[in-house]
Image: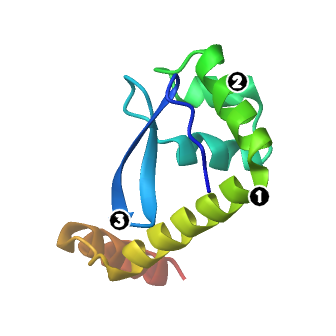
């Protein structure tokens, strides 16, 4: 079970009762987004560049939290990624995006 440090993070209702959103306190940034980058090998500086509303202390707190509860956090992050992938599959493509893709395909066919 995750023990979330309330100094840095807040827990909000998520997509499922067993899958809450964990966000940085007073910021509109999900912890999962930061830790996904960290797990992909991004440095603190690269993460800070991407999330300009977070300072180095926020990112260090996220990494420390991850390292202290790595097994539980890996399960949580994997579940969040699976949920996001499922949502992408269920979300219809906006008609304007479909038209752009169709035009691009026709242009590519015409260039051959």
Q: Residue at x 35, y 65 (%)?
A: 15
Q: Is residue 84 left or right of residue 26?
A: right
- Mark 3 to mark 1: distance in Å? 21 Å
Image quarter of residue 5: top right
- Residue 71 shows which numbered tag? 1
Q: Is residue 67 left or right of residue 72?
A: right
Q: Position of residue 26 (x, y in %)?
A: 37, 22
Q: Residue at x 77, y 31 (%)?
A: 43
What's the colour scheme? rainbow
Badge 1: few (under 14), some or many (20 or more) residues near its Cα, within 10 Å?
Answer: few
Badge 2: few (under 14), some or many (20 or more) residues near its Cα, within 10 Å?
Answer: few
Q: Position of residue 85 (x, y in %)?
A: 49, 73
Q: Residue at x 54, y 73 (%)?
A: 82
Badge 3: few (under 14), some or many (20 or more) residues near its Cα, within 10 Å?
Answer: few
Q: Is residue 44 left or right of residue 12?
A: right
Q: Is residue 29 left or right of residue 57?
A: left
Residue hosting label 2: 60
- Residue 15 shows which numbered tag? 3
* Quadrant in the picture for the C terminus: bottom right
Up/down of 87 relative to 67, above or below: below
> Which of the two discs, 1 and 2, labels the residue nearer the N terminus?
2
Q: Secondary structure at mark 1?
A: helix
């Amino acid at each position: 079970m995750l023990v979330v440090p309330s100094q840095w993070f807040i827990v909000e209702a998520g997509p499922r009762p067993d899958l809450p959103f964990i966000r940085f306190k007073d910021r509109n940034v999900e912890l999962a987004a930061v830790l996904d980058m960290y797990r992909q090998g991004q440095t603190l500086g690269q993460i800070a560049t991407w999330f300009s509303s977070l300072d180095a202390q926020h990112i260090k707190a996220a990494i420390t939290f991850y390292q202290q509860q790595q097994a539980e956090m890996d399960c949580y992050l994997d579940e969040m990624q699976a949920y996001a992938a499922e949502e992408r599959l269920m979300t219809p493509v906006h008609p304007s995006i479909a038209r752009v893709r169709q035009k691009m395909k026709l242009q590519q066919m015409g260039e051959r």
